[in-house]
Image (tube, rainbow, N blue to C red):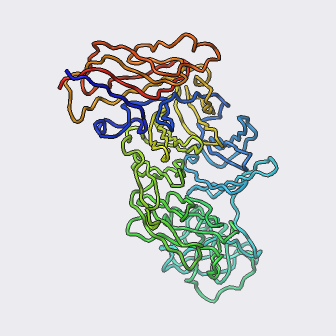
């Protein structure tokens, strides 16, 4: 039998998967639940949850920072938006989005407005003005009084189709548009057409070859059929923008059903003007990703470059400033991004973090040392088992923590602190299922589902329970012992020493840790220092965790290090 002392004074890698248990120089644990890894490498029980409000149903949370002092939480439910500020319901709006569309909304925030997009619904704008919130359809500029500044396209199925224009049934600005072959559908109503330097809107579907349209101007009948005509890029027939961001003082839309690789940028400083004009530097831009695969753009991120995340890979547009004549689109990596809109990429330490299309990887998009190319490093390489069909994500830059809500109601949490060498995953559980999450300023809000009811709650450091009544079960188990490559047959434990900080309750290997009586006084901070537990004769095999610290009592606990004393036999 050989004596050993094994000390772990950092848990900087968090919970790792079993296939990495014997990896050298990894400060991980075998199991970590409802405990956070601190920047110094120690462990502390997660904050508790306090209830804020009852919600109307299953909700998606969105943070809306209308100013530096105004942080709102929007709870989007079935055709309704509830608006909260400082944990108080301050407004409620009807919305056009069903509970099935809500998870697939994307949005971009500019000053006191949010622009929402979805491929099946026209964009909407939420505006806060003088403490009044309004929600209305996105309207393109009409700077001339004759037509809206919208983008137009020549779709593949339009080639070979000519149109004839004749008088319409509804006055001098009305026309009958007859296609040379079946082309129109009932979804064509509302579509804009452009031909003969004039813009039209289809007002009525008559047949696959005939529609009625109306112009803002009087017109003269053309002498013959027209082959040079275009349709609006955004409408009910071809779909609406899926992805959105603001970049270099332009509003950027991307990806419709008909053009999944399409990108449209507004005129500089005019976010509702998408008329490409004559190609001047400040005018609108229209372009498309070119690749042998059918890249569907999933997300747009404004960073040092305009980052374009698609279902097949990651691209960037790098020219500064962007103009119609210098668009340079380059594919950087080939990972592919998750398509669910609620899985919004997050900025962590200046880099873009996104969930891959496999729903198992958390990737970090960062420039190489030369600043020329992006890499897509995996942030959960050791902990993929904690990512289980994610449905929501947020990042809190104050705590330096990334929160990923899983479909099974658990949450995977990453503490990423590069300066202190921390990249640690843990899991959160509660008495109910986590449904959604958002960060408002320093606060973290969640939707919690329990017995078919939904609550808005938030994490509070001083809370020792969830919702005031449910104890928080926490647990951390050490890695199986690794003795310089030896695989011991048996381990005999003699003693386990814990270094604690401001702790009032804990169990180790199912035995209560006895702490000094004075620390239980109401205003005492708790015990700080070393304490030992004897386990003489306890025997474990080489594949078993030698120690487990756990508990559920409403009391604080912080673990700084664990030392195991014993013997092993090879």
- Please, is residue 553 above or below residue 276 in the view? above
Q: Percent x, y for residue 123?
A: 64, 58
- Please, is residue 522 above or below residue 190 in the view? above
Q: Residue furthest top?
A: 517
Identified at 36% across, 42% down, the residue is 382
Name the residue nearer the viewer: 274 or 56.
274
Q: Which quarter shows the N terminus?
A: top left
Q: Which quarter shows the C terminus?
A: top left
Identified at 68% across, 66% down, the residue is 271
Q: Residue furthest right?
A: 130
Q: Residue furthest left?
A: 570
Q: Along the horizontal axis of the image, is 31 left or right of 350?
A: left
Q: Percent x, y for residue 174?
A: 71, 75
Q: Percent x, y for residue 173?
A: 74, 76
Name the residue nearer the viewer: 22 or 561.
561
Using the rendered view, name the quadrant where residue 243 is placed: bottom right
- Please, is residue 492 above or below residue 199 in the view? above
């Amino acid at each position: 039998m050989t004596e050993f002392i094994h000390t772990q004074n950092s848990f900087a890698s968090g919970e790792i998967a079993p296939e990495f248990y014997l990896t050298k120089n990894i400060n991980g644990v075998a199991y970590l639940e409802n405990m956070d890894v601190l920047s110094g490498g120690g462990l502390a029980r997660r904050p508790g949850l306090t209830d804020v409000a009852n919600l109307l149903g299953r909700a998606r949370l969105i943070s809306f920072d209308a100013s530096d002092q105004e942080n709102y939480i929007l709870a989007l439910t079935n055709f309704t938006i509830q608006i909260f500020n400082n944990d108080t319901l301050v407004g409620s709006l009807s919305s056009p989005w069903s509970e099935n569309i809500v998870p697939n909304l994307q949005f971009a925030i500019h000053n006191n407005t949010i622009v929402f997009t979805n491929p099946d619904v026209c964009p909407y704008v939420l505006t806060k003005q003088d403490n009044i919130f309004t929600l209305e359809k996105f309207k393109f500029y009409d700077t001339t009084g004759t037509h809206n500044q919208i983008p137009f396209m020549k779709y593949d199925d339009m080639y070979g189709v000519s149109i004839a224009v004749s008088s319409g049934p509804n006055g001098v600005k009305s026309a009958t548009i007859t296609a040379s072959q079946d082309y129109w559908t009932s979804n064509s109503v509302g579509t804009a057409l452009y031909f003969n330097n004039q813009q039209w809107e289809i007002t009525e579907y008559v047949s696959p070859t005939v529609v009625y349209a109306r112009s803002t101007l009087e017109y003269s009948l053309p002498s013959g059929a027209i082959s040079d005509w275009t349709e609006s890029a955004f409408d009910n027939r071809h779909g609406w923008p899926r992805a959105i961001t603001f970049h270099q003082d332009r509003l950027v839309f991307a990806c419709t059903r008909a053009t999944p690789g399409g990108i449209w940028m507004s005129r500089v400083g005019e976010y509702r003007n998408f008329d490409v004009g004559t190609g001047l530097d400040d005018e609108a831009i229209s372009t498309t990703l070119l690749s042998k695969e059918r890249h569907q753009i999933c997300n747009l991120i404004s960073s040092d470059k305009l980052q374009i995340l698609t279902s097949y890979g990651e691209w960037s547009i790098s020219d500064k400033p962007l103009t119609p004549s210098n668009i340079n689109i380059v594919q950087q990596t080939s990972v592919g991004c998750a398509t669910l809109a609620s899985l919004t990429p997050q900025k962590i330490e200046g880099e873009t973090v996104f969930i891959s299309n496999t729903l198992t990887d958390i990737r970090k998009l960062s420039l190489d040392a030369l600043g020329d190319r992006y890499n897509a490093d995996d942030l959960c390489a050791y902990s993929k088992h904690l990512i289980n069909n994610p449905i929501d994500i947020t990042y809190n830059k104050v705590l330096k923590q990334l929160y990923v809500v899983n479909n099974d109601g658990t949450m995977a949490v990453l503490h990423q602190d590069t300066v202190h060498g921390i990249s640690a995953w843990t899991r959160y559980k509660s008495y109910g299922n986590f449904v959604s999450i958002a960060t408002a300023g320093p606060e973290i809000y969640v939707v919690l589902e329990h017995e078919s009811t939904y609550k808005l709650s938030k994490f509070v450091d001083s809370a020792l329970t969830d919702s005031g009544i449910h104890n928080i079960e926490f647990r951390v188990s050490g890695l199986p012992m690794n003795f310089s490559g030896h695989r011991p047959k048996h381990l005999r434990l003699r003693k386990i020493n814990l270094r604690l900080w401001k702790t009032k309750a804990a169990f180790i290997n199912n035995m209560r840790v006895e702490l000094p009586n004075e620390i239980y006084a109401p205003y005492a901070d708790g015990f700080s220092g070393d304490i030992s537990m004897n386990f003489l004769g306890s025997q474990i095999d080489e594949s078993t965790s030698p120690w487990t610290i756990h508990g559920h009592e409403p009391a604080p606990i912080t673990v700084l290090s664990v030392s195991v004393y014993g013997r092993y036999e090879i």
